[in-house]
Amino acid sequence: MDTELRRDLEQRLLEYVGDYGIVLSEEQVRLMVAHLDLVIEKNKVVNLTRITEPAEGLVLHCLDSLMPLAFISSQIGSQDVILDLGTGAGFPGIPLAIATGAHAVLIDSVGKKVNAVNDFATVLGLDNVEALHVRAEELAIERLESFSYVFARAVAQSNVLVEYAAPLLKMNGLLVLEKANPTEDELIAAKRAAKICGMKFVSRETCELPNGLGHREILQYQKVAKPKIKLPRQNGMAKNQPLGI
Ligand SMILES: C[S@@+](CC[C@H](N)C(=O)[O-])C[C@H]1O[C@@H](n2cnc3c(N)ncnc32)[C@H](O)[C@@H]1O
């Protein structure tokens, strides 16, 4: 990506986030575009994303990763520890770490993606980012009730994500999901799963990405009680025998 394109993307990202009431500094957008550039380059040798065009990546990766910030009522800051569950190439975790300054743990079950994300964090000088090759179910044993927020974009059905997040969240912590078009059945199953897992449904908000690039729904669930069953269940159970169906 040449300097002119980078500057153009940085300016566009500043304008996009402004439309959603999200305030970023020039340094923050510089880092986010630099991350996108690293992803596009790395994607030529390691399959990380289907999006290869910078302007599209700016909306579908950078802006999309930040959308939850337009809907979360509390301010996330350096005192918070946040989790990006199923980070892929670092979305939404890296943009969220840059935007909030929170300590961000980014996990993925695929090692080559985690290696790439750790390299990106080093090149960008992001000391607050920790990428781990671990499944959500395993992390819940090591870091029980450690996170104030769990984010997940394009990882699994909502009821599965509610189950993954419940043991990882501190009491009153929030699970924030980004979905394209969740069905009513998915939302009903997630509400039922939430009851079993000591979580409650908080809100469902919708927005449109610019340039007709898609519809988004931001779903929030809060941890309000201890789970009624022992969590985490064994690896794979959340997906293969989902709760709330
Ligand atoms: C479709 S990708 C989405 C990546 C990224 N969140 C994004 O929106 O670009 C889903 C990722 O979740 C990871 N994943 C799925 N289940 C997981 C689990 N139980 N624990 C950790 N990672 C998981 C997969 O390896 C994959 O990289």
Image (spheres, rainbow, N blue to C red):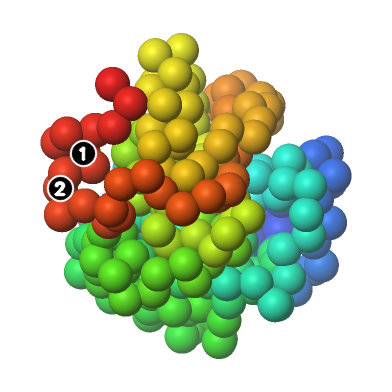
Residue 172 figure quarter? bottom right
- Amino acid on which disc 2 is placed: Gly
Q: Which of 23 and 80 is in front in this view?
A: 80
Is label 1 within 8 A of ligand 1 (CB to nearest ligand atom)? yes
Q: Is mark 1 on a helix, strand or loop?
A: helix
Left or right for 239, reference 6: left
In the rendered image, residue 2, in percent from the top left (x then y), is placed at 57, 65
Farthest top residue in view? 184
In the rendering, which numbered label is found on residue 236?
A: 2
Residue placed most toward the observer, 203 or 223: 223
Q: In which quarter of the image is the C terminus?
A: top left
Image location (x, y in percent) of residue 80: 65, 72
| Residue positioned 35% across, 50% down in the render | 164
Q: Do the residues labelled 2 and 1 touch (CB within 8 Å)?
A: yes
Which residue is labeled 1 in the image? 239
Identify residue type, mark 1: Lys
